[in-house]
Image (cartoon, helix red, strand yellow):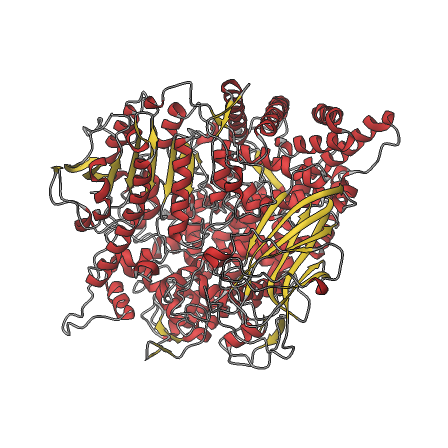
Amino acid sequence: MTFVTRKSLRRRTLLRGIGATVALPLLDAMIPALSAKPLKSTPRLGFIYIANGVIQDQWIPKTTGPNFALSPILQPLEPVQKHINVLSGLSHLQADTFGDGTGDHPRSSAVWLTGVHAYDRSRPDIEVHLATSADQIAARVIGKTTQTPSVEINLDLPTQGACDTSDCFFNNTISWRNPSTPNPAEAHPRVVFERLFGDGGSAAQRMARMKRNGSILDSVMEEVSGLDKMLGPGDRTKLNEYLDSVREIEQRIQGVEARGAHSIELPERPTDIPDTFEEHIKLMFDLQTLGFQSDATRVFTMIVCRELSARTYPQIGVPDPHHPMSHHRNDPALIVKKAKIDTYHVQLLGYFLQKLQATQDGDGSLLDQSLILYGGGMGDGNLHRHSNLPCLMAGKLGGQFETGRHLAYPKDTPMSNLLLTILKKSGVEIDKIGDSTSPLEV
Amino acid sequence: MTAVAQILGFYNPMTRFFIAMAAAVLISPSAQAQTFDSQQAGAVIGKYCATCHNAKLQTAGLVLDPTRVGNVPADAERWEKVIRKLRASTMPPPGLPRPDPATYNALAGFIETELDRAAAAKPNPGKLPLLHRLSRTEYQNAVRDLLAVEAMPKEMDYSLLLPPDNSNSGFDNIADLLFVSPTAMESYLSAADKISRLAVGDPAAPPMVNIYRVPDEQPQNVRVDELPFGTRGGLAIRSYFPADGEYRVKVTFVGRSAEPEQVELTVDGERAQLVASTVRQAAKGAQKAAPNAAATKSAGTAKDDDNDRDAAPGYGAGRRPIEFRVPVKAGPRLIGVAFIEKDEVRDEEVLRPRLRGAGAEIGVGVVTISGPYNAKGPGDTLSRRRIFVCRPAAPSDEETCARRIISTLERRAYRRPVTANDVEYLMPFYTAGKTEGGFDLGIQRAIQRLLVSPQFLFRIERDPANAPPGTAHPVSDLELASRLSFFLWSSIPDDELLELASQGKLRQPGILEQQVKRMLADSRSTSLVSNFAEQWLYLRDIENKRPNEALFADFDESLRDAFRQETDLFLDSVLRGNRSVLDLLSANYTFVNERLAKHYGIPNVHGSDFRRVTFPPGSPRGGLLGQGSILTITSYANRTSPVSRGKWVLENLLSAPPPPPPPDVPALKTEGKDTGKTLTMRDAMIQHRANPACASCHARMDPIGFAMENFDGIGRWRDRDAGNPIDASGVFPGGEKFDGMAGLKAALLSHPEEFVSTITEKLMMYGIGRNVQYYDRPAIRAIIRRAARNNYTFASLVLGVVESAPFQMRETPASSEAKTARR
């Protein structure tokens, strides 16, 4: 096994800020070598979620087709307009109430990448059941050779109450590993950093640690098979989850061992969640850009704000909590404020897209190779409607999509159709997701 | 009176006489004057219930067939619903005839007796998976009790080591939501590596860098708790040091000071070093003042780092960083960094938050602890004493000793007697480590392997091989011991409990009760405050609250800490002090320090230490509802939210959560019909309630919230809001008027069973690790009946849960595939 150093490491410059005498043993994190495949054919997918709906008539552009006129909320994307498509008319009607008890908000985030209705579990003995989400379906195919098949981020810290359902995971994640396992989403940039780039030591030390972990996992598998024989006929779900996880980590270790590892230049490890929301989200975007760039991961999900988020935005003149304000009751003052939040989120997306655009990857930019889907499962937050959802996509996914257009679809076209298209164009063999009826022409 | 029933939706447009009758019904389920047989019950149901709930009308989807009253238990789920309506006195609905109270009570009693009798004859402990993963908190406590490592260095904080757990109703220890993902598995591997190295102590470990930032809102002109008197500001850091050796403590500053300041470094409260901080010269090449070496009095040296560039940009600090070098012994230590207080008579007053940027008073910005350097050895730590139960005298003893160490650890970690096979799984890791770096490394590697074992990470309960499908059986003594310790300690059993269980003595007369009492008295039962109660009441959300700076300039980190401490001390005094749980609502005392006392307007409290204060009669404070923590978590950043407060009370104190808001909420009018004037929030809410789709829930939530309106978004008392007098009056759905917090508390306490039932239900959910269902109701009723005789003391509720069928038993699956009975 060899360690390929793609870039020389300017150690001193990186160490600044920690104290010059402190050697931070983390800089040459192990990243799978990129040389095996030309980067051109590497699809990258990002799914970014915004909650509580948007002010729709300030979101949806008034004209369609290429050279459409940007709407007020989308104005910050002017520098990248030719790299995005705005899609209007899409709906997630599986988020409507079916007369059961999970609220409209939790259903919105649950449905977004699954196309499946989130049932409540207030009746006895109903198990957690949703569906594998689009990001995870993709990660299993396009991410299987990467260090971290997918990354899950949530900028809001999980809360205990205020979920409109007792099952807060419907609000706290949009990523479902399988129908019964929601993926935990991380708010701490440090944890995201370590998932992507490892947690320290020289490349050799980390390789040794990885080998040790490999033998631990082998031994654990043996222990489990012994255990399995002793267990009665009961519910083995948890044991199977554990075993699946052990196997997947083993495969990753074998993959890295087989491909070798190389080093890239990394920033300092983040130590804390930044004080401001803007610093926080930009740091996450920076990490994700690095994750794509180094091919440590090809898939991520990010919740910019969770459903029912009561975050305030004094930095843009909105000291009011987001969710209560989204029920604007047609009060013009509240509509202005909600639109400010919507615009601000789009502006932060713009930061990320421009960063991807500025990063060279293969023949083009990282943005050209990627597809970033941005939107939510609630259209009109005031009325709790799941139709005409905010939806835009950025990037060409390696030439799979044309960009620069506003595409208006017939009312209530399933949003799941778009998920299907994205998956198919990413190279996933799939015919249906959630309530999809056919791939969407994009 | 029936105010609680009214909160719950009891609507009574009739006379006070009627209300009084309903109150009589509510007094006590056990005080039944009259008993029914099934025929009498059927007649009452036929007359008063089946007029709507019949096969034809199916009102609310419920059919009550009077002829089926002969077999109530066959339809337990439906009848438990009926019981709840009857005990809350919400049915029959207003305007429709009701039986006389004696009859009403007798019907409820009949149904309960039928259900309870059937439950006693054939207990249904509910369904739990075979494996119950440890929550992050439980893992942390288990590691603490297994390896004696606490106060992790920041780099190894558990919130960084392991992913967060999912919660249901606030609780994160619910078996079916404790998932395992590859992300979690990776975390377990990495955590096991780090924790085992820390516990064994590894002098060869690379230096660890731990960066601690002082929150901007933390005032620095008072003494920090845990730091020596005569100091102010700075930071107290509890951290674990992995080896005996030299560590560097670098301190950067924010703000400015006109005079020189002295900065003290303490280790476990003892001064290690004292230095004068020096002024950064603005001009390049200007002479830099050296640290005041004369003031340095101890081992080690303080080093000033000329090349440091991180302090100036970003913070605008007027002072250069200081770096202390100090020898520290391995193990958990309290490191203090603080300024020497110049003015000894300074009051610890209500303080303004430190302002960002230049011009503000000097404070500590960031403390970075790194090391070890020149490590001298693993030291003599509690962890090493716990782990190394033997030391090999000669190489030939090594393997025997290793086996002893490993089996001792495995017994505690797996919470059961150890087999030879168990040890064999770990020995290869010991051998590999020993070969690579000696005996200690071998033990470390074995511990690393132990910490990812499924038998450590999961509580495993087995169904007996010969148990027929779908039947209940008592769990084994060892399984019961784990249930007990995870319930009362959120951790693994100790040796005494494990020993009793291994000998099969746990269920001998008196033993269980004696163990529960012993465990409640043990300091580990603080988890009932920090894990159970904090999750039950959503108190952890206080961490996420960011009250608007302009509106709530008083809010800062010290107030947040004080809120948390007050409520924790109060909960501890009631729960672990074994008072009646009703005191949680009605107590006339609380715990405050000067900061909090000023916030509440309580005179004559000085200093940062918390003490118990008694409220005068008639004070609106007292009990959980008057505490800043709860008043803040139920508010938005810029205002109170009567809806959130009402919802919180219904959900957490009365077990009657409102359903989520319906879709297509009709838009609220913001202008009055005739006046064209913009409506106030309260008026808008009243209009909102005029809509029948909204009214049924908001009529329950809003009055509770309005009753609490005299407390602002951070729990301060107020008589006015934005110039207008506070209107804390309201009308419960039943039409009864009330005013303010006193009225609300009186209403809650007038019907204590509702609250006691709620806390029991929450305890049971937390204790068993699953949602409470209709089939748990008989057990809950039994617990409450017993606890009533003990004035509802907390211990009586805990013991009731421990002795209940759901806690004592488990059920075998109906068949091997019957796992997914859904919808």
Q: Is residue B159 above or below residue B612?
A: above
Figure quadrant of residue A115:
top left
Q: Residue, x 30% and y 39% (percent of image)?
A: A353
Viewer-proximal residue among A252 and B764: A252
Q: Is residue B406 left or right of residue B616?
A: right
Figure quadrant of residue A232:
top right
At which x and y percent is residue B421?
73, 24
Q: Is residue A28 above or below residue B483?
A: above
Q: Is residue A55 left or right of residue A110?
A: left
Viewer-proximal residue among A410 and B683: A410
Q: Quadrant of the C terminus of chain B?
A: top left
Q: Is residue A442 above or below residue B515?
A: above
**Would you say residue A292 is visible in this rendering?**
yes
Residue lying at the far right of the rendered structure:
B393
Q: Is residue A405 left or right of residue B565?
A: left
Q: Quadrant of the N terminus of chain B?
A: bottom left
At which x and y percent is residue B663?
26, 50
**Would you say residue B418 is visible in this rendering?**
no
Residue lying at the far left of the rendered structure:
A63
Q: Is residue B336 above or below residue B150?
A: below
